Image (cartoon, rainbow, N blue to C red):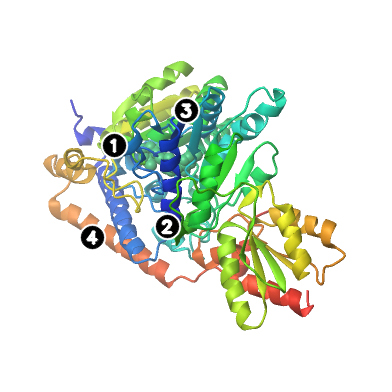
Amino acid sequence: MSEMTYRDAVNLALKEEMRRDASVFVLGEDVALYEGSFKVTRGLLAEFGEERVKDTPISENTIIGVSIGAAMGGLRPVAELMTVNFALLAMDQIVNHMAKIRSMFGGQTFLPMTIRMPGGGGSQLGAQHSQSLETYFMHCPGMYVLYPATPADAKGLLKSAIRNNNPVIFLEHELLYNSKGEVPEDPEYSIPIGKADVKRPGEDVTIVAYARMSILALEAAEELAKDGISCEVLDLRSLAPLDEAAILASVRKTGRAVVIEECWRTCGLGAEITSRIYENCFDILKAPVKRISGLDVPMPYSRKIEKICIPQPVNIRQAVMDVMSGEY
Amino acid sequence: MEARLRTVLPDQELLRLYEQMFVSREFEERCAEQYTKGHITGFLHLYSGQEAVAVGATAGLHRDDYILSAYREHAQAIVRGADPRRVMAELFGKATGICKGKGGSMHLFDPSINFMGGYAIVGGQFPISVGLAFAARYRGEDRIAACFFGDGAVNQGTFHESLNWAQLWQLPVLFICENNFYGIGTEVHRSSALASIHKRTCGYDMPSEKVDGMDVIAVYRAVKYAAEKVRETSRPYFIEATTYRFRGHSMADPAKYRSAAENEMWKARDPLPNYAKRLIEEDVATREALGAIEARCRTSVDEAVKFAEESPWPEDSAVWEDIYV
Ligand SMILES: Cc1ncc(C[n+]2csc(CCOP(=O)(O)OP(=O)(O)O)c2C)c(N)n1
Ligand SMILES: [Mg+2]
C-alpha cells in the first residue's frame, strides 16, 4: 500500500495499463504536452511518446467517434473529455453509436474503450461547467458507468474499465482529485465492475451514495454515530451495472434508506434506486425512503447560493434523523 | 503604409480608443488581484494583451449591432458599455452583478447594450449569432451580429455548420476570430490542419481577411469596412485578428508551454504603449493628457471594486428565480 491522491491513482492506472498492453492509447484535448487540464495525464507523453498520447482538436464528438473506430479496428482507446459538460457535444457518438454498435450489428464486433471525464459542481464554475450528468449515461443501455469515491477505487476501477471489452464511461470528481488514500501497489490489483462497497457498516439506516457524495455520507455518518445512530454507507462505485443486490441486502438489514445524489432530483439516479427499494423491500421498510439531491436549477455562479444547490453533510444528517424519528 | 491617425478618426475618438484599452487592461489586472485575494472564484480568463481587438472592433460596429463572445469577454462587455461596477460585482458573485451573480466571469450578458452573452462551451456562440442575425433580418432591423471566438473554437462542428448556414441564408454575421495562437496549452498548428484560419472560409465562399490584432487602428478599419459590407450585402464576412494573451489561459495556468523569447516578442507589441506612442508622435495627445485618461480609468476600476465589495450577496431564494419566464 502507498498513500496517494485520487489524481495520482488515476494516473498510475493509466500508466500501468499502457505498460501492460501496447494497444492502449490515450487521446483528448491538452492531454499530451499540457498533461491534462487537471494534470491527470502527467508524465504520459514522456513515457509513451506521441503515437500513444495524443492531443486532439476541440472536437468532442469526433474524439469519441475516432475512439470508436480505433476500438473497432483493434485498439483500446482511453479518451479524456476535459469535463463531463463537454460530453454533451459528443452524445451523438456516445449514445447513437458507441452504445448501439455491438447490439445493432448482431454482436459481430465490440468496443473495448473507456471515456474518462471529470465532473461535478462546487467550484463556482457556473451553469455550463458544474453539471452532474451521471444519470444521462446510466439511462442509456449498452455502456457501463463507473464513478469512484476513493483513490484505491479509482485505480482499481479504471484498470477494470480499460481491460473490459465494453464501452465504459469513467467519471472522476473534480473536488476529489486532491483527496488522499491508501492504494495497493500490485499492478494486478483491480476492482470488479458492478460491485458496490460497504464503506462503513451500520445497523439503523442505509445511506446509498457514490463518488463525492459517499465522502460526504461518511462525514455525516461519523457525526450521527455521536448521536447514537448507526449508518451503513454503501458506495455504489458502479452506476451501471447497478449493484441492486448489495442495495437490497443492506436495506433489508437496516430497514431504512437515504439515497444521496449530486445530480438533479427529477428522474435522477436516486429516483431509480428508491424505486427499486420500494419494489423489493416494501414489506420490511420502517420508514419511507428519503432522497437528498442537487436542486433542480441551473447551477448559479455565486458561492453564496451555489452551496445550497449541492447536497451538504448537514442535509444528509437531517435526512437520516428524519427517517429515524418517524417525522418524514 | 500606416495611415496617419487623424485621417482615420477625429481626436476625441482616437483618445476614446486609448481610454477603452486602458480601462480594459486595468480592469483585468485588478481582477487578477481580487482573484488572488479570494474575492473572485471559479475560472478567470483574462484579456490582457488582446485589447486592440475588442476596442477596435467595437468602434467599427454600430451600437445596435449584436456582440457575442466566449468566456474571455470582460473587455468586450465593458467596451460596449457595460457598467464596470456591475461587471465586477458579477465576478464577486454579488446580487448587484450584471447577471445577479448567477453568471460569473464567463457569462456576462446585457441586452440593453446588445451584448448577447459570454458562452463557456467552446463554439456555443456560433449558431446563436446566426440566429440573432436571422431575427434581425426577419424583423427588418438594421443590425448585424458580431461573433467573437478563439482559434481553438474553429474545430467544433458548430463553426463549420454556422459558416455554411450564414452564407446559405445570406445572413449579416461578422465572424471575428481572435487568434492568440493557443487554445489552453495547444498551439494552433497542433490543432488545426490549416493554421491560417481566415483561409478556411473558402469552403463556404465567404470573404475573409487577416488583420494585426495588436494594432487598434488596423482592427478598427478592417471591422468598419467588413461591417459595412455585411450590412450592405446581408452576407457574412470573416476576420482573423492575430493577437496574444499576456497571461495564462486562466488564472490556474502558469503558461509554461510558451517560451520567454516568444513572450518578449509579443510584449514588445503591447497595443497600449505602442498606441500611446503614436498618439504622442502624431500630436493627438501629450503624455500628460494620456496620464489624465489613465488616472480616470484607474478611478473607475477602483470604484468598481469598491461597489462589488460593498454589494449584498444574493438571497438563497434567488436560486429558484429567473429559470422560467
Ligand atoms: C466544448 C468545450 N470543450 C472544451 C472546453 C475547455 N476549454 C475551455 S477554453 C479552451 C480553449 C479554447 O481556446 P480558444 O478558442 O483559442 O480561446 P482562448 O482561450 O485562446 O481565448 C478549452 C479547450 C470547453 N470550454 N468547451
Ligand atoms: Mg486561443
Ligand 2 is found in which quarter of the picture? top left
**Labels 4 and 3 within one chain:** yes
**Which chain hosts label 4?**
B
**Which residue is tagged 3?**
B231
> Would you place residue A126 above or below residue A115 in this image?
below
The mark closer to the camera, 2 or 1, is 2
Residue A199, horizontal then vertical, whole percent: 60, 64
Q: Is residue A36 left or right of residue B215?
A: right
Secondary structure category for the residue under label 2:
strand
**Which residue is tagged 4?**
B295
Q: If you read the primary sequence from the N terminus, does the residue marked by circle 1 or circle 3 appear first?
A: 3
For the residues labelled 2 and 1, the Cα–Cα distance comes to 38 Å
Q: Amino acid at mark 4?
A: Ala
Q: Amino acid at mark 1?
A: Thr
Residue A196, horizontal then vertical, whole percent: 64, 55
Q: Residue furthest bottom?
A: A227
For the residues labelled 4 and 3, the Cα–Cα distance comes to 37 Å
Residue under the image location 36 percent in, 50 percent down: B250
**Which residue is tagged 2?**
A5
Residue B264 seen by the camera: yes
Q: If you read the primary sequence from the N terminus, does the residue marked by circle 4 or circle 3 appear first?
A: 3
**Which residue is tagged 1?**
B243
Residue B98 seen by the camera: no
Q: Amino acid at mark 2?
A: Thr
**Which chain hosts label 2?**
A
> Would you place residue B296 above or below residue A68 in this image?
below
Label 1 CB sits under 8 Å from any ligand 2 atom: no
